[in-house]
């Protein structure tokens, strides 16, 4: 692929990401959680970031910021802190209420994306799945990035 083709693809991706992000933010607001809270809950649940340090590293935020974020999640009953093997460490766990918020956000996001992309053909959906999988792998955003599924549908 030539540099001009890559440049055009990157321009298209950038232009596409912005309206998609705005639409997804609108879906997130319907859950009653902030984007930061939903992101942290998703990282705790899906990526198993069960310590403040792991959460901070995955979210690319400071440990004090992650700690404040978790304090809010705990206050709202969305997550809990569990005692670690010593007093200096502890584990994080998503609660049923937190899981319900993540599930609601995922469902709302999927519904919005489905509506925005309803004009895609079956072949385009298969291409999108392939590209989305490659992006997930390159961005290291979940287990699907490591273990591609065998059925592209």
Image (cartoon, rainbow, N blue to C red):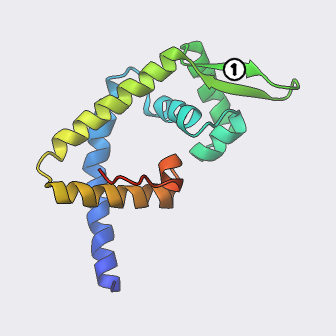
Check disc 1 and report the residue beneath it: 81
Residue 64 in sight? yes
Please state the horizontal and vertical placement of residue 26, each as a whole percent of the image: 29, 32
Q: Identify the image quadrant of residue 112.
A: top left
In the picture, measured across the screen, residue 122 lies left or right of residue 126, that is left
The residue that appears at 34% across and 60% down in the rendered structure is 130
Query: 74 or 91: nearer the eye?
Result: 91
Q: Identify the image quadrant of residue 22.
A: top left
Please state the horizontal and vertical placement of residue 40, each as a whole percent of the image: 54, 33
Q: As displayed, is residue 105 above or below residue 18? A: above
In the picture, measured across the screen, residue 62 lies left or right of residue 19, that is right
Q: How many marks?
A: 1
The residue that appears at 59% across and 14% down in the rendered structure is 75
What residue occupies the far front of the structure in this picture? 150
Quadrant including the N terminus: bottom left
What residue occupies the far bottom of the structure in this picture? 2
In the picture, measured across the screen, residue 131 lies left or right of residue 78, that is left
What residue occupies the far right of the structure in this picture? 86
């Amino acid at each position: 692929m030539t540099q001009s083709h890559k440049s055009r693809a990157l321009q298209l991706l950038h232009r596409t990401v912005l309206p998609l992000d705005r639409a997804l933010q609108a879906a997130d607001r319907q859950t009653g959680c902030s984007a930061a809270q939903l992101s942290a809950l998703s990282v705790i649940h899906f990526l198993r970031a069960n310590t403040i340090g792991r959460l901070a590293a995955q979210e690319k935020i400071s440990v004090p910021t992650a700690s404040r974020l978790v304090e809010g999640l705990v206050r709202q009953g969305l997550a809990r802190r569990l005692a670690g093997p010593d007093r200096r460490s502890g584990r994080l766990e998503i609660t049923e209420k937190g899981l319900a918020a993540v599930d609601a956000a995922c469902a709302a996001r999927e519904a919005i994306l489905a509506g925005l992309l309803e004009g895609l053909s079956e072949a385009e959906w298969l291409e999108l799945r392939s590209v989305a999988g490659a992006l997930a792998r390159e961005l290291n955003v979940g287990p699907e990035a490591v273990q591609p599924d065998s059925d592209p549908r």
